[in-house]
Amino acid sequence: MTSNAVIAIHGGAGTISLASMTPDVEARYHAELRAVLDAAQRVLVEGGSALDAVTEAVRLLEDCPLFNAGRGAVFTSAGKHELDASIMDGRTLKAGAVSCVTRVRNPVLAARRVLECSEHVMFTADGAEAFAQAQGLELVDPSYYHTDDRHRQWQLARGQQRAMLDHDGATLAAAAHTPDAQITGDAPPREPIDPDNKFGTVGAVAVDLHGHVAAATSTGGITNKQPGRVGDSPLIGAGCYADDATCAVSSTGTGEMFIRMVAAYDVAAQIAYRGVSLDEAAHDVVMNRLPRIDGRGGLIAVDAKGNVALPFNTEGMYRGFARVGETPVTMIGR
């Protein structure tokens, strides 16, 4: 057994919204990240597997409306929600994923069932929901995912007739920062990372007391996306990857670029084929390779030795990690 057990999480990356970074708002996000880390850390302390730890972390992130996954999912151009998730076990290299689900409360739990109970790796849309229902997972009315903040964000995107990506221009961010968009006593706080200038994904990676690693990623997509669009989050090798021999990775960013670069797998491949450290491999993918095609965002990664890497090439990334026996650490900006 190893004492290097650790859990790391992310809640999306993007542009820091200075107008929103009041102490109270920032504290709320740190508190939510710490609560998730505390729960996942307990799984590891009690001898649970890395797979169990990342499942629990992402499930909790999906249930938190502050993040774009599960309950806080963004709206498609059709005014609906389509959610994606994936999970991978570094011990067995088994993986599971779902995409474009509209009624599954926790897509990560559906992905976990695919990993454990199916000969396939991915189900999509109606097939994914039928599989989840057959597995006895909780289905919800689509209204469950609705939050007023995400709806306002969608209306802004519709007015611009495009999907919200990280570098879609200062005009959108400025419009979002008008006085009526600021925090009021009866309205939820805006995000420290500008919601109109952000990649909304959540994820977790872990190594357990036995030295096994796992990764999981979940998302509500991008605001005003075309229905049926699938990003990197449910794709093994792009948004999620885990192998005991190298590392576990969960990414967040411009999904199409992470797909084209097979970003999560590239970190593991560099460790395997170049013999570099986790930190060097993760840094190269995020800071050197992805920017060549305007790929923006970040990733979290751990290896079996308990090393942790949290690189990002944007202004900020919701992130944190917790080693067994130590106080969780959470961060937003640089």
Image (cartoon, grey):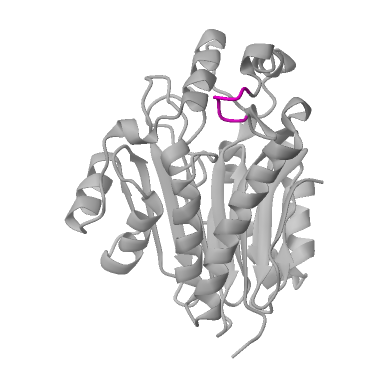
- x then y, percent, for residue 187: 55, 25
- Viewer-proximal residue among 37 and 282: 37
Q: Is residue 154 above or below residue 192?
A: above
Question: What residue span does the magenta drawing correspond to?
Answer: 184-189
Q: Residue at x 54, y 61 (%)?
A: 241
- Asked whether, in this view, residue 53 is left or right of residue 97, the answer is right
Q: Quadrant of residue 297?
A: top right
- x then y, percent, for residue 110: 33, 55
Magenta includes 186?
A: yes
Magenta includes 266?
A: no
Most common secondary structure along the magenta stretch: loop
- Viewer-proximal residue among 251 and 17: 17
Report whether residue 103 is seen.
Answer: yes
- x then y, percent, for residue 294: 71, 34
- Asked whether, in this view, residue 98 is left or right of residue 169, the answer is left
- Viewer-proximal residue among 43 and 268: 43
